[in-house]
Amino acid sequence: MTLSATTDDRPRHAERAPRKRGPKASAGKRLRGWLSSTWFLTPALLLFACFVLIPILVAFFTSFFKWGGFGFPDEFIGLDNYRKLAGDEVFRGDLWRALVLVVMSLVVQLPLALGTAVLLNQKMRGRAVYRAVFFAPYILAEVIAGVLFGIIFLPGSGLADALVEDLPLLGGLAGKWFSDPDTALPTLIAVMTWKYFGFHMMIYLAGLQGIPKEILEAASIDGAGAWRRFRSVTLPLLAPTLRISVFLSVIGSIQLFDLVWVTTTGGPTHATETMAVTMYEFGFKRYQMGYASAISVAMFLISMVFSLMYQRFALRRDLQGSVTSAGGR
């Protein structure tokens, strides 16, 4: 069987017609576009430079000096502040307490926020009121929250002592909350959880409301129960929100200052002291600004290393595909 004589004799791989492209923008037009973008970005760049870049550079610079905070630093001591920092038992304790705060935030605060968000995402009477009540502590200023809990845990006359003094298991906590080194840090963790879990709850609520209901309904029709839907459908779709929440929680725990300073000022005997509290103590009470700058540099490096590693290994899948054609894709 042969092909018809009218069969087209064109080559198998015909050359494609060249793609038509629009006229290139003139150099003057591109320059005007660049100047326009720069003009709109200038205010933000100036603010970023004044309040972020310049303070970081000043902290790096002063960390190599013995400086009391007045005048221009002129007594150069090299790495002595960092050597002192490496051998400081209080700072090593700050690192350990920061790790404890991070772990407890991830183990207690975030699961509590997630469970509350799942419950308040259901149809129930007064749901908006419950959301507002749980989110209200986050709106409250840290100073006000610190003063409030300082009164609640006041030894002898505080509300907490009145509630637990007659209880068989908790009666021994009366008068100890923030005044005993063994109970001060757990009490601070409880206050932190009360203060910040509402913020993460709202983040999770936003993520839950972004999950299409059709997917959950399809899983329910296939016979998946409530726990199976949560484990196999809700959690995977909520993973980007969870990763952002974990990042914010870790960075916030590392840099915690105001709530600690108002409630305990780092005491008793450094039991609740954080790196930021130690930095403030040396910088603004002992007037050792050079050493305080070294502590701030250490905090910056810890936060930056964690941020880069977390972005590289945890947020990488969320950033894939987000690069636009301006980035070369």
Image (cartoon, grey):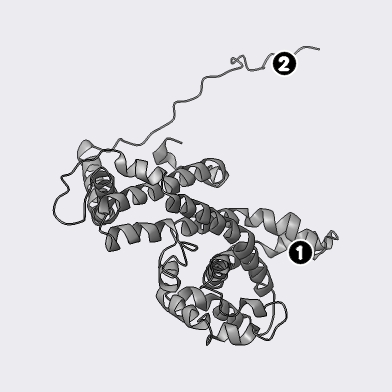
The image position of residue 100, as x and y in percent, is 56, 56
Decide which of 76, 99 is in the foreground and name it: 76
Tell which residue pokes out farthest to the right in this image: 223
- Residue 116: image quadrant is bottom right
- Residue 115: image quadrant is bottom right
Dot 2 falls on a residue whose secondary structure is loop
Decide which of 190, 159 is in the foreground and name it: 159
Q: Dot 2, how many residues are within 10 Å of its Cα: few (below 14), some (14-19), or many (20+)?
A: few
Note whether residue 209 is visible: no
Q: Dot 1, how many residues are within 10 Å of its Cα: few (below 14), some (14-19), or many (20+)?
A: few
* Residue holding disc 1: 217
Q: Residue at x 56, y 41 (%)?
A: 313
The image position of residue 152, as x and y in percent, is 52, 82
Q: Residue at x 47, y 59 (%)?
A: 252
Q: Earlier in the sequence, mark 2 or mark 1?
A: 2
Tell me which amino acid carries mark 1. Answer: Glu
Question: Which disc, if any, is residue 4?
Answer: 2
Left or right of 197: which side holds 276?
A: left
* Residue 132 in the image: above or below residue 226: below
Q: Label 2 to label 1, Cα distance in Å? A: 58 Å
Tell me which amino acid carries mark 2. Answer: Ser
